Image (cartoon, rainbow, N blue to C red):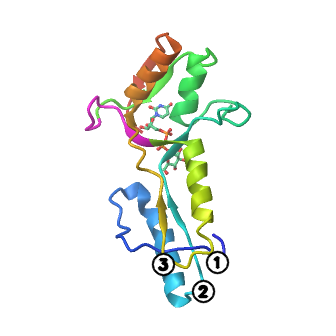
Amino acid sequence: MYRRVPFVSSESIRMNQESCTKHLMIEEICLDLYQSDHGWKIILLRHFNPVGAHPSGNVGEDPRGIPNNLMPFVQLVAVGRRPALTIFGTDYKTSDGTGVRDYIHVVDLADGHIAALNKLEDPKIVTFRGSSSGSILSVLALLNSASSNGKKDLKICEEEGK
Ligand SMILES: O=c1ccn([C@@H]2O[C@H](COP(=O)(O)OP(=O)(O)O[C@H]3O[C@H](CO)[C@@H](O)[C@H](O)[C@H]3O)[C@@H](O)[C@H]2O)c(=O)[nH]1
């Protein structure tokens, strides 16, 4: 968090998911701080899962070891560095039963951060929400997309939801 950064939302900042609680708490601390001292300018950045790489290929994700996250794992399966993707759960209340996330391309996210930083001198209240990319994908949809892009079926196995 930076001193003198724009902030604050005129919108409701309520979130539904329990996993968002810690983020919401931090936003509330920022709100309190702003209320106590309007000299603070704070940007609240909300986004979901960044994926992808810079088109130059110079900056991207090349995890060492076993990745924790879906996209890098799928990529390693696609290039044959991992044998199969384990799907963590297939009985969620989603269209195909696998977990869904809202993905944002990492370059769009970087652009969003720059746009937010350009508001530093703007005294108005602003929040940045980078999550509405319209790219809400299930694990299977993401996997199928990677399979069709790479023109080969990627192997999967299933296990209980985590
Ligand atoms: O090998 C894998 C990896 C992930 N998934 C599923 O793929 C989806 C996306 O998982 P992941 O890429 O790990 O993203 P998140 O679960 O959304 O976790 C991100 O979002 C969390 C909440 O902000 C942060 O705590 C994490 O660090 C960050 O990676 C979820 O349904 C996972 O269960 C699999 O099925 N198999």
Say which element carries label 1.
Answer: loop
Residue ID at (34%, 32%): 98
Q: Pointers 1 and 3 in contact (CB under 8 A)? A: no
Say which element carries label 3.
Answer: helix
Q: Earlier in the sequence, mark 2 or mark 1?
A: 1
Total marks shown come to 3
Please state which amino acid type lies under the numbered disc 3: Leu
Q: If the image is split into quadrants, where does the N terminus sit?
A: bottom right
* Front residue (pair 129, 162): 129
Q: Identify the residue at the far right of this view.
A: 58
Q: Which residue is mark 3?
A: 31
Q: Pointers 2 and 1 in contact (CB under 8 A)? A: yes
Residue 129, image x, y percentages = 46, 57
Q: Which residue is mark 2?
A: 39
Q: Which residue is mark 1?
A: 4
In this picture, which residue range is highlighted in magenta? 92-102
Residue 127, image x, y percentages = 48, 66
Q: Quadrant of residue 88?
A: top left
